[in-house]
Amino acid sequence: MKFLGNVLAVIVGLFVFSILGVLLMFGLIGIAVSSSSDKEVSVSENTVLHLDLNGRSIVERTSEDDLDLSMLGNPFGQEFSAGLINLKKAIGEAKTNENIKGIYLNTGLVIAGQANLHELREALVDFKTSGKFIVAYDEAYSEGGYYIASVADETYLNPIGGMDFNGFSSEGIFFKGLFEKIGVQPEIFRVGEFKSAVEPFILEKSSPESRLQTQSFLDDMNQFALQGVSESRGIPFDSLKKINNMMLVRKPEDAVSYGLVTELLYMDQVLSKMKEKLGIDEDDDIKTINATDLSKLAKSKNLTSSNRIAVIIAEGEIVGGNADGVISSEKFAKEIRKARKDDNIKAIVLRVNSPGGSVVASEVIWREMAEAKKAKPVYVSMGEVAASGGYYISAPADTIVAQPNTITGSIGIFGMMFNAQELLNEHLGITTDVVKTGELSDFMNPTRPMTEVERNIIQNTIEDGYDTFVKRVSEGRGMSPEAVKEVASGRVWTGNQAKERGLVDVLGGLNTTIELAAARIGAGDDYRVVYYPTKKPWFETIMEDLGNNVQIKILQSKLGSNYAIYKQVEKLKSYEGIQVRMPQEFIIK
C-alpha cells in the first residue's frame, strides 16, 4: 500500500506541476500580449533586421497579430512558422527605413518549398539595391537554407559546421508489398500515363513515365537554383554545377575554397564584423528588430485607397465542406463570391499553394472563379505547388503567374478503392453476406472483387471527369482541347516549363501578380491589398496547434522512421470520390 501511495503522490504531483506550468505559460503570454499591444513599434537608429528562420517552416501567412513567444522557450516541441507575406513586408520596410542599416540572416535549416524560398530570396535581392548590407551565418546549411543565404554580401559558416550542397532528390514510398501481405487489392482508375498518384499502391517503384517527369522537373529546379547561387557568389555556372553534382563540399573548409561561403567564423566573430559595419564599439550591443514588429510599420500604407485588391490565400489540399487548414470548397467559394460582390474590390488575386484533391470541390471553386472573372479582373499567383486540382481552380484566371520553380500542371484524374475480401476472410476470419434488390445495389462493395460492369461505370466517370478538366483548361487558357491534352496526361511541370507550354503567362511571385492587377485597374501605386480568409486570433491558432502537436509527437515517438508511411496511409481517408491530385507527394531535398 505504501508503494501505491507513493505512486499516487507522484502522479498527483506531476498533475499539479503541469497545471501550474500551463498557468505560468498563460501568464507569460498575457504579459507578452499586454506589452505587444501597448507598445508602438519604432525603429532606433543603427538597427539591424534579424531574420531567424533556422528550423522554421515558411507558410503563406501567419496570424496578423503574431507574437514573438521565444521568451517561453519551446516546452511542447512546437514547430513555429514564419509567414512569407510578413517576411516580405519587413524586408521591404527595411529597404526604405533609414534607421535600418542591414539584415542579419539565420536560414540554415529553414523548411520551405523551392518557390517560396525563391520568393523570399527575390525580396532580399531587391533589398540589396538599397546599398545596405546582408550578413548570413549558421552552424549548418541545408540546400534551401544556403540558397537564401548565398544572396548575402558575406556568408559565414561555423568552423566545424556542415553544408548540404549536392543537388535535389525525391524519394517515393510504395505499398504494393504491404497490400499483398495483408490481402488487400487496390482497384485503380485513371486517365493519363503520367497520373501516377496511384503508383505507390500498385507498384514497387516508379513507372518510367513517373521517373521521366520527376527527373525533368528536378533537373530544371536544380539548374535554376544553381544559376541564382552562381550569380550571387560570382562562381561560373559550370564550375558550380560540378561542385554540386559531385558533392565536393564535404567539410567546412571546402565551402570556403570553392567560394560558397566567405569565411569560417564563430557567431561572436560574425557579430564583431557587423559591429564594425555599424560603427559601434565591441562592448556595445547590436540593436535588432524582428520581422513581425517591422512588418507592422508597412501595414499602415494606403489604408484610405479606394482601389482595393483582394488576395485570397488558398493553401492546402482541396476538400469539400467548410474545414480550416485546407482549401475547403464551401469556405473558399464564399470568399471568392464575397470579393466578387464587394464593389470596393476592384480585382481579385487567388494565391494558390495546393497539390489538388477532390474534383467536386475543385469544380465548386472553379465555378466561383469563372463567375468572378465576369465581374472584375481575376489573377492567380502560384506558390510552391499549384498542380492538378490546384491548376483546375486556377484555369479561369485572366492571367496566371508562377515562379520558375513552382510545381504545376498535372492535368489528370484518378479514382481508387480497395478490395479487402482476402484480408477479411482469410486473415481475420470475417465473412459477409449481402441481400440486395438490384444488380448494383452494393455498388463498389469493398468486401468483394469489383465486377466488369462496375469497373466500366467508374472508368467512364473518370474519363468524363478528365474531359471536363481539359475543357476547363481549354476555355480558361484559350487553347484547343487537343493542345491541352498534349501537355496534360497528368504530367507535372515547373513554372518555367509550364510557361513554355502555355499553361502559365508570367514568371514572378505574389508581388508581381498584385502589380499586374493594379496596372489592369489603372491604380498605379495607389492601391490597398486586403487578405482573405480572415486569420484566426493567434491564441486560438496556437492552442489548436498545441493539441495537434501532442498527437503528432506521440505518433512520431512510437513509429520513428515509419511515421512517413503512416502519414501516407492516413491520407487515404481524404481520397473520397474522384481525385485531381499530384502524382505523389514530392519531398525534395
Image (cartoon, rainbow, N blue to C red):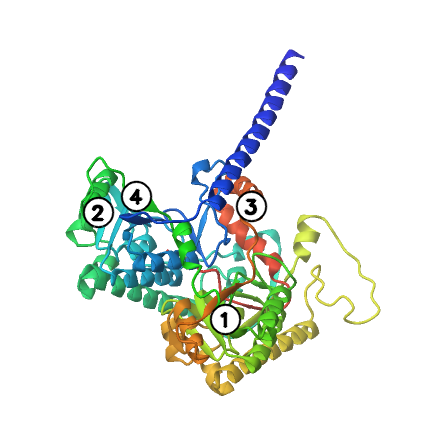
Give residue 19's mark.
none
Name the amino acid type tagged 2.
Answer: Leu
How far from the left and from the top, in percent, is residue 494? 39, 70
Residue 287 shows which numbered tag?
4
Q: Secondary structure at mark 3?
A: helix
Q: Residue at x 43, y 48 (%)?
A: 40
Q: Amino acid at mark 4?
A: Lys
Task: Report, in whole angstroms, how far the alpha carbon at label 3 lies from the one at label 4.
Answer: 28 Å
Q: In this figure, what is the number of numbered marks?
A: 4
* Structural crowding at the residue carrying mark 4, measured as other residues with C-alpha within 10 Å and reported as few (<14), some (14–19) or many (≥20): some
Query: Going 33% across and 68% down the picture, which residue do you hit?
Result: 220
Mark 4–mark 2 distance (CA, rounded to whole Å): 10 Å
Q: Is residue 78 left or right of residue 417?
A: left
Q: Earlier in the sequence, mark 3 or mark 2?
A: 2
Going from the N terminus, do you reach mark 1 or mark 4 first? Answer: 4
Q: Judging from the image, what secondary structure is the residue with disc 2 in?
A: helix
Name the spot of residue 587 as percent of width and height, x first: 43, 57
Query: Disc 1, disc 4: CB below 8 Å?
Result: no
Residue 539, numbered circle: 3
Gap in angstroms between the C-alphas marked 3 and 1: 29 Å
Q: Which dot, 3 or 2, sits closer to the camera?
A: 2
* Residue bearing the label numbered 2: 278
Cα separation, mark 3 vs mark 2, equals: 37 Å
Name which residue lies at 53% across and 48% down. 538
Residue 60 lies, with reference to residue 541, above or below; the image says below
